[in-house]
Image: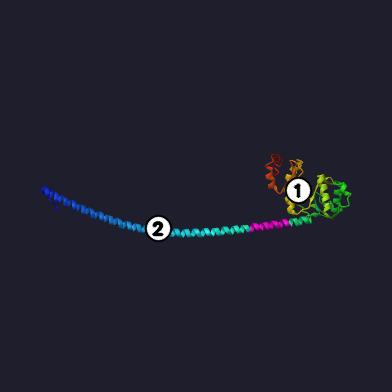
Amino acid sequence: MDMDVTKLSEMEFRVTMVKMMCRLEKSINENVNENIESLRAEMRVNLAEIKNSMSQMQSKLEALTARVTEAEERVSELEDGLVEEKTKIEAGLKKIHAHECRLREITDSMKRSNVRIIGIPEGVEKNRGLEEIFEQIVAENFPNLARETSIRVQEAERTPSKLNQDKPTPRHVIVQFANIRSKDTVLKAARAKKFLTYQGKGIRITSDLSTETWNERKAWGGIFKALSEKNMQPRILYPAKLSFRIDGEIKTFQNRQSLTNFVTTKPALQEILRGAL
């Protein structure tokens, strides 16, 4: 309701202003209350949505945790299984190695009274036989042994039995003695003379061993040669250990790794074996 306030008395004006202020305050309070209630309702809705979302996230997290736990348990089981399998494999490999070593020992034992001669040309045995050729080797290299009647050859043959035409080197000759003493006597004489010949051509006489032992011994070849050139008295001990003299002592090595470890402490030896080890 519009009124002309200029026509009101001072008292009426004040009363009118107070009434207007009261109405304005009431209106403001009503609006504020409505806004507050609306905000509360909106917050309740949002809070419910947040709680629902958190509940869903919690469920998903629990499900994920359960899956992770299950996966970890499966991984742990697999790891345990792998450890068990590895243990079994290692045990199996040890057994195989033990059997191989035992087989090698048996094979070497069967060859205990044999020597292997390397370098005899092919075909020379056609007219005289390998036993007679061995006697000639003894006479040519060990005249003193030639007069000993205790050295008795039981059999001599080429190995392998068939000639490989593609292989340029002659087959080895295996000489079997009647006893180990004869073999040891010949080997001792061969080591003492060092350089052996047959009809003027260089040959070698060594123990007859299994293929495995022979290959392991052969692996020392370059090192053995380098040590021999320095007069370090290298020897190959059974089954395939290397020994030589250094600093007034005899040192023995089971394998190349043990020798390598030793060489690192001996600069002079390291220089001798440069390129061979």
Please report whichever mark, 2 or 1, sits nearer to the chain's N-terminal start: 2
Q: Residue at x 88, y 47 (%)?
A: 144
User: Regarding mark 2 in the picture, which secondary structure is present there?
Assistant: helix
Amino acid carrying label 2: it is Met
Residue for badge 1: 236
Q: Residues within 10 Å of mark 1 (few under 14, many from 20)?
A: some
Residue 93 in which image quadrant: bottom right
Magenta span has 94?
A: yes
Give the label on residue 54, or none: 2
Q: Are dots 2 and 1 in contact, CB under 8 Å? A: no
Q: Considering depth in this image, is 142 or 67 the residue closer to the camera?
A: 67
Image location of residue 123, percent across then percent down: 83, 52
- In the image, the segment drawn in magenta is 88-102
Residue 273 in which image quadrant: top right
Relative to 153, 9 lies left or right: left
Spatial CA distance of label 2 from label 1 is 78 Å
Magenta span has 60?
A: no
Q: Which residue is drawn at 74% across and 46% down?
A: 243
Q: Residue at x 28, y 56 (%)?
A: 38
